[in-house]
Amino acid sequence: MRRFALLFFSLLLVSCAKQDQSFCAGATAKSYEPSFKIWCPTMNKGHFIPTIYGEGVSPPIMWEGLPLGTTHLHITVLDATCTYECDSCCQFHHWELEIPLHELPSSGPIIPGSIQAGASKTIDAKYAQPNGAGKKSYFSFAPPPSQVHAYIYQATAYTMQGGKKRILGRSQSDPLLFRVAQ
């Protein structure tokens, strides 16, 4: 078990270094929590995301099962098609959020457990991190008209300990498909 934990931690460090994401800097892995889940609540049949999210409207996001002790949630919505087609040359993040859970109200566009569709218009200024275009905002899904792209939601639950992020759990949605309306 100790060897497995050491191997897992080593792979995490290599992965973080390879991705060169500021979120990984100083992070330490604790465990993966299988009950922690993230998903898109408005998928159409066949796992297609409604085309409205290619028109400047941010998608809704839901999560459940946050690990005990979670104080922050890091959410990334990314184009997984690029990752599969060209490895690390095109890991485009459409939306990246850093949310301190103690700040969430009990109602509004973002509450514990969910972010409403279109919430980017009101929450980007406070919670958004630079997306793949370098802007702190939601970047609409926009694959070429002849292509279907797969998008995934990723979430990392963590707490701050001694100035470092202590990861308590990670989750990733099933791939969600999107194509521009024709």
Image (cartoon, rainbow, N blue to C red):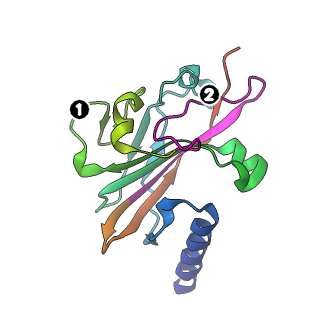
Pointer 1 local density, CA inside 10 Å: few below 14, some 14–19, many at least 20: few
Secondary structure under tag 2 reads loop
Residue 108 point in image, percent of width and height: 26, 30
Label 2, label 1: how far apart the Cα atoms are = 28 Å
Residue 74 point in image, percent of width and height: 42, 52
* Residue drawn at x 49%, y 35% as measured from the top left: 138
Q: Nearer the viewer, residue 52 or 33?
A: 52
On screen, residue 27 above or below 50: below
In which quadrant of the rendered image does the C terminus lie?
Answer: top right
Q: Nearer the viewer, residue 180 or 175?
A: 180
On screen, residue 141 above or below 159: above
In front of the other: label 2 or label 1? 1
Query: Which labelled disc corresponds to residue 136?
Result: none
Residue 136 point in image, percent of width and height: 46, 41
Horizontally, residue 38 falls left or right of residue 104, namely right
Which residue in the rendered view is the most extreme toward the bottom? 2
> Which residue is labeled 1 in the image?
107
Amino acid type, mark 2:
Phe
The region drawn magenta spans 131-157
Q: Earlier in the sequence, mark 2 or mark 1?
A: 2
Query: Which labelled disc corresponds to residue 48?
Result: 2
Which residue in the rendered view is the most extreme toward the front? 134
Horizontally, residue 112 falls left or right of residue 24, namely left
Tell me if residue 149 is in the magenta stretch.
yes
